[in-house]
Each structure stands twice: as C-alpha cells, then as structure tokens.
Amino acid sequence: MKRFATLDDLYAAIPPTACKGLCWESCIAGVRAHPDEHERMRKLAENRPTVAKVGHGQCRYLTLERRCSVYEARPLICRLYGAIENSQIGCEHGCCDEPLVEAESFELMKAYVLLRSGQYEPI
C-alpha cells in the first residue's frame, strides 16, 4: 500500500471532478472527517456568509443554491464521491472523466483511516 504523509497527498491521488451540482441530495449531515478537515471547512465557512441549511439531514455546508460552500476544503469522502467507477458513490452525471477503480479507492480509504488514527508517520 502506498504511504501518504498528509491529507493533501491523499487528495492528489483522486482524479479531478467537474461537479455540476446535480447530486446535492447525497450531501448528508454527519459525514465523518479528519479533525484537520473539520478545521479547514470551519475556517473557510467563516468567510462565506451564504452558508445555510437546505433541509433536515443535509450537510451544513450546502448553500441555498444547493452547492458546497467549502468545496475546495471538502473532506476525503466528499472528494471520492463521483470519482469511483461503478460504485454506489460513482457519478451518474458524468462529472469525472477518469474515475478510480474500486480497488484504488479502497487503498485510499485504508490510508485515510491510518492517517486519521495517527498510525501513519509522516515520511
């Protein structure tokens, strides 16, 4: 398994998506994230007064326009959404041209869990 020193290293391994904002109903409250990810989102949201709750159970960072107000600081699980081929979290709207195969996404998730638990030492 490839070793990742930081969250940003993990993020760099995910193919880019050109989000069209058509899957906002998948943005639910209670998504688990690394403490550093929570901090990044909180800091970014401080400067974005448009943040508003869209509905019960929706992510607190969705705007009234149903877009992610912290898109550039979103956690790994949100970055993976739409970037995995043939999965329950694959994009049905064509937002990712070259998605990961499931095995690659599992490796990233394992590395993320290890990084979160402090079992990963920076290289």
Image (cartoon, helix red, strand yellow):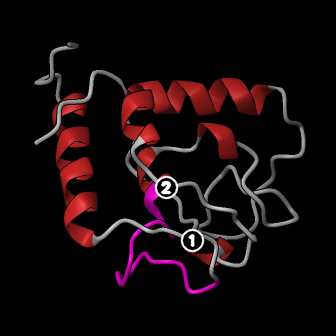
Position of residue 47 measured from the top left corner of the image (x, y, whole percent): 84, 27
Q: Secondary structure at mark 1?
A: loop
Q: Is residue 104 left or right of residue 15?
A: left
Q: Is residue 98 left or right of residue 18?
A: left
Mark sitting on residue 15 = 2
Secondary structure character of the magenta stretch overall: loop
Position of residue 18 measured from the top left corner of the image (x, y, whole percent): 69, 62
Name the image quarter holding the N terminus: top left
Measure the C-alpha gap from mark 2 to mark 1.
8 Å
- 118 w.r.t. 28: above or below: above
Count of marks placed on residues: 2
Identify the residue at horizontal 57%, vertical 71% (top origin): 97
Q: What span is colored magenta in the figure?
A: 80-93
Mark sitting on residue 97 = 1
Mark sitting on residue 50 = none
Q: Residues within 10 Å of mark 2 (few under 14, many from 20)?
A: some
Residue 30 visible within the image: no
Q: What amino acid type should be assigned to the residue bearing mark 2? A: Pro
Q: Quadrant of residue 50?
A: top right
| 29 part of magenta stretch | no
Q: Secondary structure at mark 2?
A: loop
Q: What amino acid type should be assigned to the residue bearing mark 1? A: Asp
Name the image quarter holding the C terminus: top left
Identify the residue at horizontal 45%, vertical 29% (top origin): 8
